[in-house]
Image (spheres, rainbow, N blue to C red):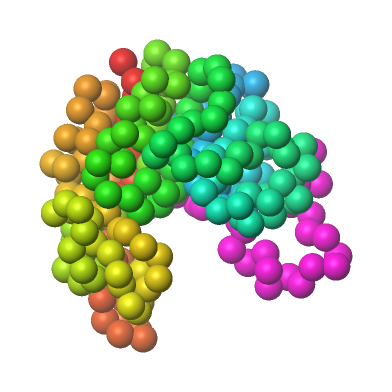
Amino acid sequence: MGAAIFQRRASEPLENHLSRWPWSDLVSLCRRHARHLPSEARILELGCGVGANIPFFLAQGWRYFAVEGSASAAAQAARDFPMLQDAVRVADFTAELPFSGAFDLVVDRAALTHNCERDIRLALARVRECLVPGGLYIGVDWFSTRHADYGRGAAAEDAWTRRDYEQGAFGGVGRVHFSDSGHLRDLFAGWEWLAMEEKTIERFAPEPATLAMWSFVVRKP
C-alpha cells in the first residue's frame, strides 16, 4: 500500500504536490514516542489540510481519522485517499470531535495554535476525553513568544493571541497564538510531559527575522 499512497495522478502538475510530504518534525516525534503503538491503533489528526501527513500514518498500519475546518481541503484529502472518505470530517475541532470511540494518539501540526486561549483549552479538554489512558498528544509548530511576529498584528481575546496580520507568513490567516514554556505547561496541566523542544531559526533573507516554534509530546495519565 505504501507505494500507491505516494503516487500522484498523472493529470496533476507536480508543483501541486510540493507541500504534501509528511512533516519531518512530526515523523521524528512519532518515531521516538509512538513507535510502541500497535498496528490498528486509532490516530486522530487535528487540521489535516490536504493530507500531507496521511501517507506516514497509513504506512504504520494505524487507523487514521482527521478533523479539518476547510471543506475544500478535506475534499482534496478524500479524493487523494478514497479509503478515508468516512474518516476525514469537516468540523470545528474547538467545538466538537465528530467521532465515537477512543484514540491512542492525537497529533496537531500548527492547528490549535491558530486559535485563542479559550478555544484551545476547550479543544484540549475534548482531546483528553477522547484519548485512552496513557494516550499521547503530539504538537508540532506551536508558535513561540520568541517568534518575530509575536509583537505584531492586532491584540485579540487574550495576551497570547494576535490577529489581523496584513503581511508576512501570518497575513490573512486569522488568529495566531504564541506560547512560552510556562504557558504550555499551564495549558497541559495534569498531563505527563515526555518532550518539549523549541526550534529557533535565524532567517537572513528576504529580510532578517527570528522564527521560533514549539514541538512537544504529552501523555494522558
**For the C terminus, which image quadrant?**
top left
Give how far across and how far down residue 198 sits, in percent.
26, 51
Give how far across and how far down residue 87 sits, in percent.
66, 34
Residue 4 on the magenta span: yes
Residue 26 appears in the picture as rendered:
no
Residue 69 appears in the picture as rendered:
yes
**For the N terminus, which image quadrant?**
top right
Residue at coordinates 30% horizontally, 85% vertically from top-left?
A: 207
The single residue placed furthest to the right in the displayed view is 10
Between residue 92 and residue 13, name the one nearer to us: 92
What span is colored magenta in the figure?
Answer: 1-28
Quarter of the image holding residue 167?
Answer: bottom left
Q: How many marks?
A: 0
Q: In the visual, does 143 lie left or right of 1?
A: left
Q: In the visual, does 146 lie left or right of 68?
A: left
Residue at coordinates 77% horizontally, 37% vertically from top-left?
A: 83
Residue 8 on the magenta span: yes
Between residue 196 and residue 130, name the one nearer to us: 130
Residue at coordinates 27% horizontally, 60% vertically from top-left?
A: 212
Between residue 115 and residue 221, name the one nearer to us: 115
Between residue 209 and residue 186, name the one nearer to us: 186
Residue at coordinates 28% horizontally, 36% vertically from top-left?
A: 121
Give how far across and how far down residue 65 sits, in percent.
60, 33
